[in-house]
Amino acid sequence: MNKFVCGLLTAAVLLGASSTVSAADYDFYVHNRPFKGTAHISSRSVSAALDDVLNALGYTWKVEGNVIAVSSSAHSASRSGRAPAVKLAGGPALTEAMPYQITFNGTPVNLPVDFKAGRVMVDVESLAKAFDLRYKVSDSMGSIDLLVPITKAQAMANMPKPKEKVEDKKDGAAEAKDGKDAKKVDYKLNDNGKIETDGTNAQSSIKVDNFDWYNNEGTASLPPEIHFNTITISNSGDKPVTGITLSVDALRPDDNSSANSWTTNVGTLDPGKTFTFSPEDSVWTNYSRIPVTCKPLITHDPPKEEPKKEETKPEPALTEEAVKADPVGATSGKPAEESVTDEKTIKADPVRAAVKSIEK
């Protein structure tokens, strides 16, 4: 019996040791940054002040009667979906208790509100569903994240393109065969009419020569950091490449969404030239502790097509039949008037008749 009780106690200890993080240990993040507003965490749920959450999201709002009109149009989101460097968010403090109706970008949404301690409160997971956001709980990391999902175009821009199999092409153009002109290249372009590459796209002459970054995994008390030191690209082609933009994204492995992005405008890169990017804010703190990996993305203009030169065709040479048919004897070396063969004309001129008789 004592052994049975000891076994139960041991099992209880092991079960307690393997349990998930307690509610008090969860941290709440918005846009991958610690939420600094009023919030109450209970188990895996968060109740937060509505105006504090809207401000953290970068949204604007106004109150018209009992309607809270929320808008994301003033929030100029970056390509990675993060909050912009300059926030245009804001609105009046929501401190009045009343049965509010909420609209988002002009459309009514189902989002119940509560009133506690002089603040209008909402359930954050319900807000995420109403505004089409992402509410993500990580038990292993002890984190709750509210994220703005990126669009399909943004996701495609973040994803490195696979190396394309190009048949009968060399340096982005098809080789001429049997003396015929090279075929027109069908370049793969993004929504902005640009070629994208991570340094391996066969249709781009831009290559990545060096990419230096590392992940500082942090400690129990300090969150991990991404150190992006430098990246060097080069133009391996024989023509200048224009309109180059270079980005490095810290991508989450689960959905390839960008947690942070470093971007610079390169402009034009001449053949054989290199460009090195070393950002000033090279260290990014990964508060959510979700593992990320850094990927480069280069966009640039497609090559300009050179105008086709018009060929000048030589005049055809006169054939033997054409020479014989020449009525003026241009090819005989004789004056035109001596090439007359009309018998009546010859007989009318005694001198010519005598010459003709001698020739015969």
Image: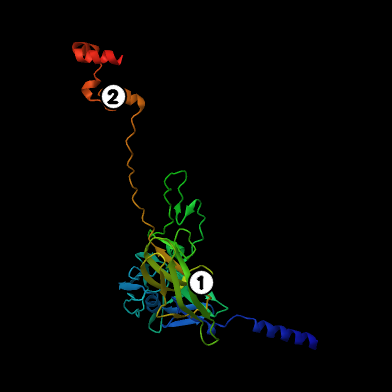
Corner quadrant of residue 89: bottom left
Image location of residue 230, percent across then percent down: 45, 76
Front residue of 12 and 159: 159
Image location of residue 336, percent across then percent down: 22, 24
Image location of residue 108, percent across then percent down: 38, 65
| Tag of residue 326 | 2
Left or right: residue 301 compared with residue 349? right
In the figure, 360 relative to 98: above or below?
Answer: above
Q: Residue at x 23, y 25 (%)?
A: 335
How packed mark 2 is, by other alpha carbons closer than 10 Å (few <14, some 14-19, many 20 or more), is: few
The Cα–Cα distance between marks 2 and 1, rounded to whole angstroms, is 85 Å
Sequence-wise first label, 2 or 1: 1
Residue pushed farthest left? Answer: 349
| Tag of residue 89 | none
Q: Residue at x 73, y 84 (%)?
A: 8
Left or right: residue 64 compared with residue 42? left
Count of numbered circles on the image: 2
Local SS, label 1: loop
Query: In this view of the protein, can residue 132 be seen by the observer?
Result: no
Query: In this view of the protein, can residue 344 be seen by the observer?
Result: yes
Residue ID for mark 1: 252
In the figure, 226 relative to 254: above or below?
Answer: below
From the image, which quarter does the C terminus lie in? top left
